[in-house]
Image (cartoon, rainbow, N blue to C red):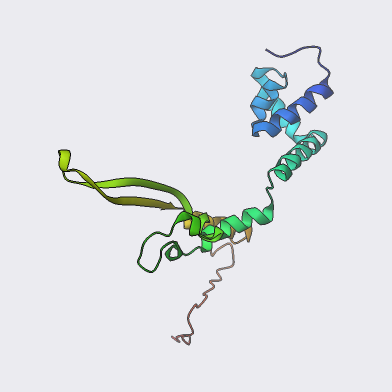
Amino acid sequence: MAQTGKPAADRRVRFAYEYAKDLNATQAAIRAGYAPRSAYVTASRLLADPEVGEQIAKLLKRVTDAAEITAERTCREIARIAYGDVRRLFDEGYNLKALADLTEDEAAMIGGVESFEEYQGRGEERQAVGMVRRIKVRDKLVALEKCMSILGMHKTASPGETGGLNLTIRLSSDPPRRG
């Protein structure tokens, strides 16, 4: 139920605080005391308000600073996944390296580890014969897509929109073919 008698400026500040919690504008408007039936429209109006936007930016900056979330750190983590070489996770005998021995770059590639014992035999003759570890590697293509977005490489256009120009980039040192 919407609160009444609350000054509009107080509710706008409250909206900014509530929005900074979970970035859900409609729910933030409701929690700030605006009518649930019109919360979506109210939230859109509040997000377009420069003063509210400034308050939200200050709150989010405080949160990102406290969590040490920076563009540089974020890009570095994406790059670790995008450019990581899965072969570096294994030793010369093709065994997974101990997690404690992985570098930060190597560990960033891992999305999860599952360990379980492997057994042989049945009943009383059942014996543990080893430990099996499965690793889930983070999605390299998703990370590369994020890198491309950051670099502005996602500008897609049909040949008609670009005047029909096709660009070919040769990655080998072979001379171009004629004809």
Q: Position of residue 169 (x, y in %)?
A: 52, 75
Give the residue displayed 42% in from the left and 65% down from the top: 87
Horizontal side of 84 relative to 52 (left or right) equals: left
Residue 142 or 50: which is nearer the viewer?
142
Tell me if I can see residue 163 in this picture: yes
Q: Residue furthest front?
A: 124
Q: Position of residue 98 (x, y in %)?
A: 44, 57
Residue 97 or 149: which is nearer the viewer?
97
Tell me if I can see residue 154 in this picture: no
Give the residue displayed 79% in from the left and 33% down from the top: 52
| Placement of 61 over or under 94, stated as above or below | above
Residue 178 or 18: which is nearer the viewer?
18
Horizontal side of 163 relative to 87 (left or right) equals: right
Q: Position of residue 58 (x, y in %)?
A: 79, 39
Horizontal side of 132 relative to 47 (left or right) equals: left
| Placement of 126 over or under 139, stated as above or below | above
Q: Position of residue 41 (x, y in %)?
A: 68, 26
Give the residue displayed 71% in from the left and 40% down from the top: 63
Give the residue displayed 37% in from the left and 51% down from the top: 134
Of the 4 image quadrants, the one containing the N terminus is top right
Horizontal side of 28 relative to 141 (left or right) equals: right
